[in-house]
Amino acid sequence: MVIWKSENSEDFFAHIEKLTDEDKFTECIDLLTSIPQEERDYNAWYQLARAYQNFAIVGDDDKGTSSFIGDKALLKSIEILNFVKEEGENKAEWNMRMAYAYQYLTCEEERALPYAIRWGELAPDDANAFEVIKECNEEIEKRKQMTGAQNNADASCEAPQIEEEWGIYLCNQFWCDFPAVIRLNLALSKFDLIGKYPKRLTLQILYKNPDEYGFPTREEGELLYRIEDDILDIIEKHGDILAGVVKCDDRVHIIAYVKDEAGYAAEISELMEKKFSDYVYTVAILLDENWEMYFDALYPDKYEYQSIMNNALIENIRNNGDIMVPRVLEHFLLFKTEENRNGFLAKVMEDGFEEINLEADDGECEDEDTEYPYELLIGREDSFEDIDEIVWNLMDLAEEFDGAYDGWGCNVVRE
């Protein structure tokens, strides 16, 4: 391996070319980012942008890259090229890289086109430039025709009257197994909105200073909240629906369901250029008639949903002036048979839980026609910090006994 030293730059970049020919783009990125920033010239930044694009488009060993990971690499390449815009904007190669970055981001051909045209002006003998121009124009025209056909539907800007039930949870394995913090309007699952808002808008914004887990720092997070508020204003002006916000893998993803895409690209572009010009972003509006992103990717599973409920209850307890010390936490469960109820109780007593008497005799509901007529209330002294794991274990064990977990509570403790 050739290590960067200013005096051996020629050998270093020759090695980068060799790795590029071998489709070893991650190695290229690692080597190029090892160059101290104060020693990076235009060529070093350009080569790094190229490596990110090759990784996104071709992939290591020519194996391709998933679009989720590739999008970040393309956004990184744009951010890098912007570092050397003053030196590069009149070079064919710089405009070529900007054109390719936007062309390979979904629905960004309009932003790729000016760079492709400038590339063609600076390198009139390069047939690739004119091929990119042709491809971008064809894709833009195709989208216009599709939009024109779909916009015959009701385009009312009146927002639907729906309640909001926002939940936030940590998903340990989101897209491509990255950790993510997801904030979602859970109430949308209760309304018949599918078909009325058939398109999904996704705005991705690349962080400036992500932490080691791919999340924003506190300072940057405050700025991102202001961006979210401004984007929400645009969505509501169109009478559309903000579904959720995902923070994952060095990016925030703002996701909405919309009737059509008319006006969004221009309005978001104007906002970002006017108020948040330092941020690199991409906007895509795609057909998602069945809301697959909402239900299959964003909506929490039973454990994540319970975690949302746990956090909401803890926050309510804290807001009531509780000093948040360990105490007996009471858990309510339901069972189909008395035998299963008693079997479950015997099992959890091994872990230190005790039965708490209910007013109904023998733990049986008055309504004997219910599916789960046998109630059980148990308690154990625990810390709030452990509540998710405690509840998840009780949920799993209850299922083994053909029962259902039905929530927890506790007495408030004040000073």
Image: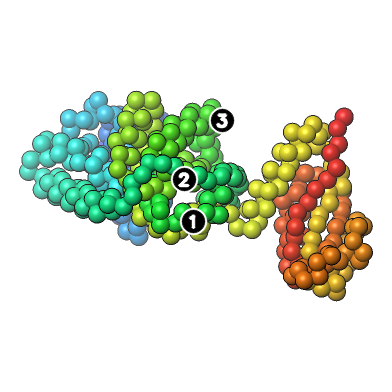
- The answer to which of marks 1 and 3 sits earlier in the sequence is 1
Residue 86 versus residue 21 in the image, above or below: above
Residue position for label 3: 218
Residue positioned 36% across, 44% down in the render: 156
Amino acid found under the numbered disc labelled 1 = Asp
- The answer to which of marks 1 and 2 sits earlier in the sequence is 2
Amino acid found under the numbered disc labelled 3 = Arg
Q: Secondary structure at mark 1?
A: loop
Judge by depth and name the residue closer to the eye, 157 or 252.
157
Q: Residues within 10 Å of mark 2 (few under 14, many from 20)?
A: few
Which one is closest to the eye, mark 3 or mark 2?
A: 2
Q: Residues within 10 Å of mark 1 (few under 14, many from 20)?
A: few
Q: CA distance from mark 3 to mark 2?
A: 33 Å
State the residue lying farthest toward the left.
125
47 lies left or right of 139: right
Residue position for label 1: 192
